[in-house]
Amino acid sequence: MKLVTEKRPMTSRLFRFSAPIVSILVALFVAGFLLLAAGVNPAQAYLEMLQESLGSTYGLSETLVKTTPLIFASLGVSLAFRMQLWNIGAEGQIYMGACGATAVALFSGIESHFLMITAMFLAAFLFGGLWAGVAGVLRARWQVNEVIVTLLMNYIAILGVDYLIYGPWKDPKGFNFPLTAQFSEAARLTEFFDTRFHSGFFLALFCALIMYLFMERTVWGYEIKVIGNNPKAARYAGMRTGLAIFFVLFLSGAIAGIAGFSEVAGLQHRLQHGISPGYGYTAIIIAWLAKRSAIGVVIVSFLMGVLLVGGDSLQLSWQLPVAFVYAFQGLILFFLLASDFFVHNRLKLVRGEHHA
Amino acid sequence: MKKFVLLALALMLILPQFAATTEANDKKIKAGFIYVGPVGDAGWTYAHDQGRKAMEALPFVGPSTYIESVPEGAESARVITGLVRKGHNLVFTTSFGYMDATLDVAKRNKDVIFMHCSGYKSAENVGNYFGRMYEPRYLSGIVAGKMTKSDILGYVAAFPIPEVIRGINAFTLGVQSVNPKAQVRVVWTQTWFDPGIERDAADSLLDVGADVLAMHQDAPATLQAAEARGAYVIGYNSDMRSFAPNAFLTAPVWNWGPLYSKIAQEVKDGTWKSEAIWAGMEQELVQLAPLNDKVPAEVKRLVEEKTAAIKSGELHPFAGPIKDQNGEVQVAAGSVAADGDLLGMNYFVEGVQGTIPK
């Protein structure tokens, strides 16, 4: 007898929707033993995590602040996934978007809040888009693998931003510390309820809606899906796949770039090292879990926000080491990804030949 | 009798409340610390945590909390607010990248006192503090300059910011005060804490012939590299000799305990006010770790003399004439660099081989 995996002939709808929930429960159960070993009551810890991330205006505001860049970046990544293009470069595109928005904020001299924010948004869109567009051209024209190009361009983007903040964009009044000057009030997104929650979140929801309509209700969206599923058939049908590849990667990077805009205009109010603590990489996991759906991206990003913000409370309330928090978050992701495998595959015991 | 019982009952109800109020008046300090690295880094964060423990030993200071490996930038504001929401009334944020976040949280929580380490901003309820690490750095340069045979010294440096540049310059001036031929080579790692990258940088310096290394990093990887290759090394942050018993010469180290205790005392007495603290060897905030026995007695004596001179104010490591790498005079003969110039230092002195990214 041996254990084999095989593809399920059909995936049950019920199973597909319940699998993530079940897997989170299993993960919490397993992580509970970790907590017990650390001398913490798991039920109390989970309650505290929920309390911390959702139980107050403040907690909720922080969770949404965290959710915002994740939505943008994951929408970008998932758009490319739709066409079987793997954009691993959302991190770099966030940096480029932030870079574009900062250039406008620092040097345009626009005084009107509305015009300033619009210009910053467009700059971020363009910078992020062109950055990913490089990979698009290389892929469309010369079949260069976009995984490698987008990934490596992350490092270039981050180092490029470092160059600017250590050099020409350094705040002249900042004692030579590597920061740009703080943005004027005109270049800041509105904050609400005396928290850090800012209008970038609504923009993210709006973006998700547009993306949903674009994919489901337009010919372009349809073409992207067809090309993704079967490029040969698409070419037979007269679709211009090369152009579509560039277009989709451009758009993918542009949307990720908006995350950079939203972070500098809504939260940081200046450009500095480490503006994204890895949102672009988390976005890949989110896009995968969300099954390429725009609505799914919003939901999973929010859950990820809860997980990240709630993780702080483990350190705060029980003085657990940070490594424990990482292990805990890793465990949850591990089970989520595993559940996805079991939705599409099943384990089966088969008898060896001589038994038959 | 009945009345007596009632009175007794009433007293029993009231008395604990009195006890509770007196306790509340004797309000303890509940301090919180934000750390940029893990407490086990053996360096920067470890040194701050030693200071925290020293402060915690005071009778009026309650159990304190720390949060480790908090990313710099806007992300940190949430963690700082978390401490405030948990009832901490004195919060230390111990890395430069927390500056904006500290001020932002402080603006929303006027009844909490914040102390930010290594920045330049302050507010009514935010003070900032740092140490004149360049003083023991200079002394460690004297030791390195005396001990090198190849006249090539290696310096593993984190980020090209004024704090680090100041340290490299002070070290180099110390080296050149006893060995004008020696050169200091700098490698940037662009990280505070990454033992792998730090080790690579240290190895590359040993490869070009450096026989004494110094470093401005939070991990002891440079020490381990020197130990493995039979070179000498100057530590930093804390006395790291256990990582390199043979290679370790000395280290400029932080001694946060007295300062943290003093701040806690001021907060308790109600005498705390926002100020920019920049204390040196005289106040014992920065020190030079005991020298290795391999250092000859005459060098030890020299270091002792110079230590006394620095403490008395007779010797300032940045006393002119000081020229930069291009030979331009940065500090004129007969004067010393002003604190403002030291805080924003953005040039290498003569004798440093390396560039500052601009």
Image (tube, rainbow, N blue to C red):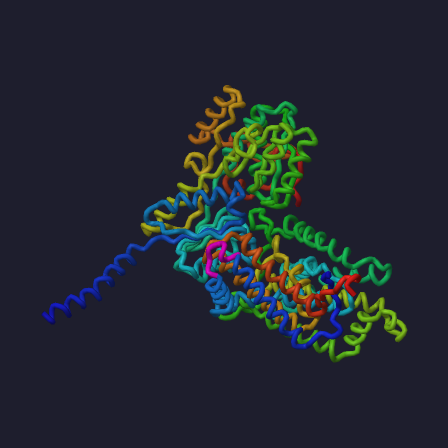
The residue located at (80%, 69%) in the rendering is A228
Write down the quadrant of residue A136 in the picture.
bottom right
Residue that protrudes farthest toward the left in the picture: B1
**Left or right of B327 on screen, residue A222:** right
The residue lying toward the viewer, choosing from A14 and B317, is: A14
Q: Which span of residues is magenta-colored?
A: A34-41
Where is A245 relative to B346, above or below?
below
Q: Position of residue B129 (x, y in %)?
A: 46, 46
Q: Position of residue B117 (x, y in %)?
A: 48, 47
**Left or right of B7 on screen, residue A251:** right
The residue lying toward the viewer, choosing from A118 and A199, is: A199
Where is B172 relative to A147, above or below?
above
Write down the quadrant of residue A278 in the picture.
bottom right
Q: Position of residue B134 (x, y in %)?
A: 52, 36
State the quadrant of the N terminus of chain B: bottom left
Q: Is residue A345 visible?
A: yes
**Left or right of A99 on screen, residue A7:** right
The residue located at (48%, 39%) in the rendering is B254
Q: Position of residue A27 (x, y in %)?
A: 58, 63
State the quadrant of the C terminus of chain B: top right
Residue that protrudes farthest toward the front in the picture: A355
A163 inside magenta stretch: no
Residue that protrudes farthest toward the bottom in the picture: A217
Where is A142 relative to B199, above or below?
below
Q: Is residue A119 visible?
A: no
Where is A175 relative to A57, above or below?
above
